[in-house]
Amino acid sequence: MKRFLIPSFLLLLVGCAVQSRPQGGPKDETPPAVIKMTPTLGALNFTGNGAEIVFNEYIQGIKLRGNIATSPPLEGLEFEIIGKKLKLKWEDEQLLENTTYRISMGDEIGDLNENNKYANLEVVWSTGSFIDSMQVGGHIDKTGKGAFEDLTIWLLPEGSDTVGLPKFSTTPGKDGSFYLSYLPKDTFDFLVFEDINFNKIWDDGVETFGFLKGIPTSSDSSLIAIPYSAERFEFPNLDTAALDSVANFVDTTSSENLGLISFTIPPSADSVILYAHRAGDVLFDLCTGASKDTLKTEAHYYAPGKYELFGYLDLNGNGLWDSPSWTLNTSAEPLISGQTFEVKANWELEQPIILPNSKEDKIEP
């Protein structure tokens, strides 16, 4: 019998062919599946300091570090992805007695090849003999610029005079919605803020915030809206020399080169502090007191150009814009912004003003 020797390089080629990825065929759109979780979902009397999730395929979590939320907070939480496993670890001896814990990873775990996402991945356990079943959800009622995902939501003990670490926390989705489950039957004060320095605490006076107090958890899906504004009242940068120059122009030029403008301000239970400016070189005020009737201001001549209105409702009548106060339980005074008008030479205009959060229905007859 003759014996045939196969060259070693052919064996190498055969081995490589077995390892190659098949060409063509449908795209993989199936997310990885969980085949084992420790502790098991809803485990009772768990007091360990780590968790592990095993999937049926290799996984990735590119943005997982910034999107893990724990309720209540877990100090020193770290994660590691090894092949098909996601390992979580936290500091020893910090779990509270008879408490339900949740680690939420959102939609940040996907398969290695196509990054098909596992939806709403979470680990839930209790250190006691039952799992809390209350919930709360809603959305952030936001004004101003900024992404919802940059905000943090804290649940604090009801009636807290000062803000310490939260009992529970979460991050809103891209549309501003949020949902917390496995909560105890309790009442909480909600704080939403942007952690601009990433120190995982709220810095009052530095970071914008909003709040809603005295919200009970529920067994149904009732929703709440938490007010939050990224805006502050600020004067624009003004050119003093230009202000003087424009004022001199208005005083010395003929009326044919100016516009005659008056303003109508709707009824308001609060004083209206209102200004207008033109590219930083003109500034005038239209401040009024509270009124149950529509007000029409006296007409004045203004230099031609595009003007922007800005101001606020002075809710407490102190003549200053007041930011929100957690201690006083007061919201920020509503801002007047986003309104413009144009002045043309030899032209008369009656410009209406739109006020935010009108309290007209509260004005006494």
Image: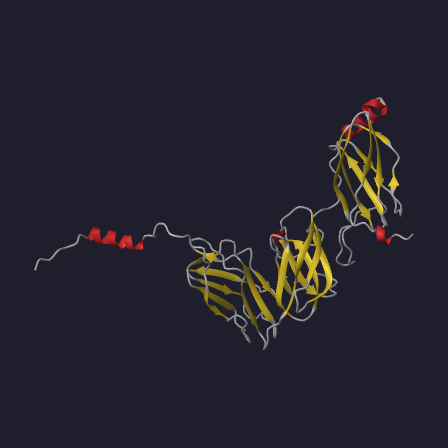
Nearer to me, 87 or 355: 355
Q: Residue at x 79, y 36 (%)?
A: 276
* Extreme-front residue of the structure: 26
Q: In the shown orientation, is residue 230 left or right of residue 244?
A: left
Q: Establish if 233 lies above or below 149.
A: above
Instruction: Determine whether 165 is above or below 360 in the image.
Output: below
Q: Which quadrant of the figure has residue 238? A: top right
Give the tally of numbered discs. 0
| Residue plotted at (72% across, 59% down) | 212
Q: Is residue 3 above or below residue 335?
A: below
Residue at far left of view = 1
Q: Residue at x 56, y 62 (%)?
A: 104
- On the question of residue 318 being in view, the answer is no
Residue 95 showing in the rendered view: yes
* Residue ranking furthest to the bottom: 129
Classify 69 as above or below 357. below
In the rendered image, residue 151, in percent from the top left (x then y), is placed at 63, 54
Q: Nearer the viewer, residue 49 or 350?
A: 350
Q: Residue furthest right?
A: 365
* Closer-to-camera residue (22/186): 22
> Horizontally, is 246 left or right of 225 in the view?
right
Where is residue 365 drawn, in percent x and y?
92, 52
- Near-viewer residue (315 or 2): 2
Q: Residue at x 44, y 53 (%)?
A: 114
Position of 183 with respect to 274 (left or right) is left
**Residue 141, image x, y percentages:** 69, 53
